[in-house]
Image (cartoon, grey):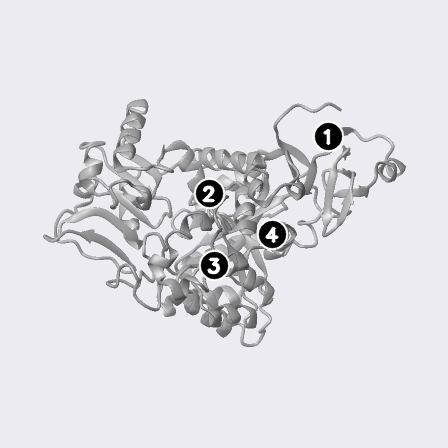
């Protein structure tokens, strides 16, 4: 089965272009002009007329959460809520539509957008239900609010013992307000009925279909944990064997103890892998989020001097796991947002790479938000990869100076500086923290503006990428991050047939218009996984 795209504007990198590309299920066979392709293969089994549209190497998101995205698609959508009253009304409507629920879940609220100007509390959620537990998670995923029913079921109304690397907010009398931060959220797990493999598969497939629809052909997804390893791996393997994975997936696995990490190392050897499901790196979390003031800072927050955030791992815990992974040749990518967390990670990577300072396992830091110039230079000197989220600028640019002060804000989100100094930079969205739309991510990378105000000046515009540089971060550099630069990330003979066809030409648009581009067709694994209209042979 050979498929040909003709009448296209195919970007081959820099200023190189072609009109036609031919592939079979395994690889791209030829790229060039119509005459050049016809000389090699006069008749393809299937021909797609691109109508002059732009064809790019398939987009890759190097950090998101497919399972959480699938849950979000099934739960209450709290994104872009502008008031607590609006969230309560959305939740009540959802509950009326789903009367069979035993626990009410929602995600996506952000108190910085609320007209009331405050966090949610249990009394707000009591207005949704007094008889069922309600758990509403903030957009960042690092804070959740529950109602009184949930607290009572957990036995947490009095004599609250604060967990390590987490916090349960309490009022002046010591009674929980309903807010759980970081590792304290693990205490909410007993409220949730255990998911079956079929439920997990349903949620993963929902999210993968959304990714393909958005134009993604590969995602690095953080779904496997120490607690769900067997179920999650089983779900992924079944989806792969059933041909129900429209995007390729590189697994990022959050394993927080030696036993589960050792088990994962053994499973990687035993379970067959292919180009659709890749058993990828150890993924650790060292702090929280900037919006929730739980990102771990070296100095107290400028707008809340009572806290420096929350370190969710100690240096000893971190070293034990990273050293074990490194010794067994397993890559590590670690969540770090605050400057204290980033410094701890750079110290750790410098330590494990003492004998191989070029970082051959391509260890990296996910997010890399709050930095000073010394930290930025250390990324280059330690050859640490940066898996960043330009789309975070949509919201964060409006709060960063408030949170960390103007001086530190002027050296943060320095994604282009990282690349110019030699760090390998790739882009992700952290979906469902932000939407997985790669064009919105691309827009934020090249404009440094929020998605609602393209007319504004933007945050630190000197850190903007050119379009070509940003595309490389979403294709070639992303493939490098998973050791696949010889197979993916470019349109060339021998590469895997993953392509994103755009409904508008990004190269002809003003940068502010890139956010409006969508995928016209997404081709992953050599197959059309998404199309906006029917094409003819």
Q: CA distance from mark 4 to mark 3?
A: 15 Å
**Residue 362 visible in the current orientation:** no
**Mark on residue 453?**
2
Q: Gap between marks 1 and 2, in whole Å?
A: 32 Å
Observer-side mark, 1 or 2, equals 2
Q: Which residue is mark 3?
A: 413
Please tell me how crowded label 2 is: few (under 14), some (14-19), or many (20+) other residues with Cα within 10 Å: few
- Where does label 1 land, which residue? 51
**x and y percent of residue 474 in the render?**
60, 50
For marks 1 and 4, the one nearer the N-term is 1
On screen, residue 90 versus residue 342, left or right, reads left
| Circle nearer the N terminus (4, 3) | 3
Q: Quick check: can you spot residue 367?
A: yes
For this rendering, which residue is in front, 220 or 109? 109
Q: Which residue is mark 4?
A: 470
Crowding at mark 1 (Cα within 10 Å: few <14, some 14-19, many 20+)? few
Nearest the camera: 387 or 2?
A: 387
Q: Is mark 1 in CB contact (under 8 Å) with mark 2? A: no
* Nearer mark to the viewer, of 4 and 2: 2
Q: Nearer the viewer, mark 3 or mark 2?
A: 2
SS under mark 2: loop
């Amino acid at each position: 089965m050979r498929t040909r795209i003709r009448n296209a504007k195919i970007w081959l990198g820099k200023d190189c272009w072609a009109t036609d590309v031919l592939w079979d299920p395994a690889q791209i066979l030829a790229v060039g002009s119509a005459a050049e392709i016809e000389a090699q293969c006069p008749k393809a089994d299937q021909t797609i007329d691109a109508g002059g549209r732009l064809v790019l190497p398939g987009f890759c998101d190097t950090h998101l959460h497919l399972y959480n995205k699938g849950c979000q698609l099934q739960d209450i959508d709290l994104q872009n809520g502008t008031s607590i009253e609006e969230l309560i009304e959305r939740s009540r409507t959802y509950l009326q539509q789903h009367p069979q629920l035993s626990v009410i879940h929602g995600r996506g609220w952000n108190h910085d957008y609320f007209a009331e100007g405050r966090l949610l509390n249990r009394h707000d959620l009591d207005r949704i239900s007094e008889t069922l537990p309600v758990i509403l998670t903030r957009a960042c995923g690092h804070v959740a609010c529950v109602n009184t029913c949930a607290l009572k079921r957990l036995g947490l109304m009095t004599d609250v013992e604060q967990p390590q690397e987490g916090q349960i907010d309490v009022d002046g009398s010591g009674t929980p307000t309903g807010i759980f931060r970081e590792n304290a959220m693990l205490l909410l797990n007993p409220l949730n009925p255990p998911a079956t493999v079929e439920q997990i598969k349903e949620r993963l497939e929902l999210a993968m279909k959304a990714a393909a629809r958005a134009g993604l052909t590969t995602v690095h997804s953080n779904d496997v944990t120490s607690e769900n390893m067997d179920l999650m791996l089983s779900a992924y393997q079944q989806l792969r064997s059933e041909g129900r994975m429209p995007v390729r997936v590189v697994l990022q696995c959050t394993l927080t103890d030696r036993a589960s990490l050792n088990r994962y190392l053994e499973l990687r050897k035993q379970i067959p892998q292919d180009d659709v499901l890749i058993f990828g790196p150890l993924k650790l979390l060292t702090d929280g989020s900037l919006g929730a003031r739980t990102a771990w800072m070296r100095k107290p927050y400028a707008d809340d001097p009572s806290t420096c955030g929350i370190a969710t791992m100690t240096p000893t815990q971190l070293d034990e796991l990273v050293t074990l992974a490194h010794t067994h040749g397993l890559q590590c990518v670690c969540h770090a947002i605050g400057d204290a967390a980033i410094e701890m990670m750079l110290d750790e990577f410098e330590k494990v790479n003492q004998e191989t300072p070029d970082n051959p396992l391509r260890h990296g830091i996910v997010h890399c938000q709050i930095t000073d110039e010394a930290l930025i230079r250390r990324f280059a000197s330690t050859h640490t990869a940066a898996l960043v989220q330009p789309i975070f600028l949509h919201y964060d640019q409006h709060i960063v100076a408030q949170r960390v002060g103007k001086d530190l804000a002027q050296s943060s989100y320095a994604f282009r500086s990282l690349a110019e100094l030699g760090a390998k930079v790739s882009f992700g969205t952290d979906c469902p923290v932000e939407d997985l739309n790669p064009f919105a991510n691309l827009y934020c990378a090249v404009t440094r503006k929020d998605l609602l105000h393209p007319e504004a000046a933007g945050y630190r515009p000197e850190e903007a990428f050119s379009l070509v540089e940003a595309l490389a971060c979403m294709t070639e550099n992303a493939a490098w991050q998973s050791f696949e630069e010889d197979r993916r990330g470019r349109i060339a003979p021998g590469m895997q047939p993953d392509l994103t066809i755009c409904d508008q030409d990004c190269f002809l648009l003003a940068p502010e218009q890139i956010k409006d581009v969508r995928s016209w067709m997404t081709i992953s694994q050599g197959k059309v996984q998404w199309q906006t209209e029917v094409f003819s042979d």
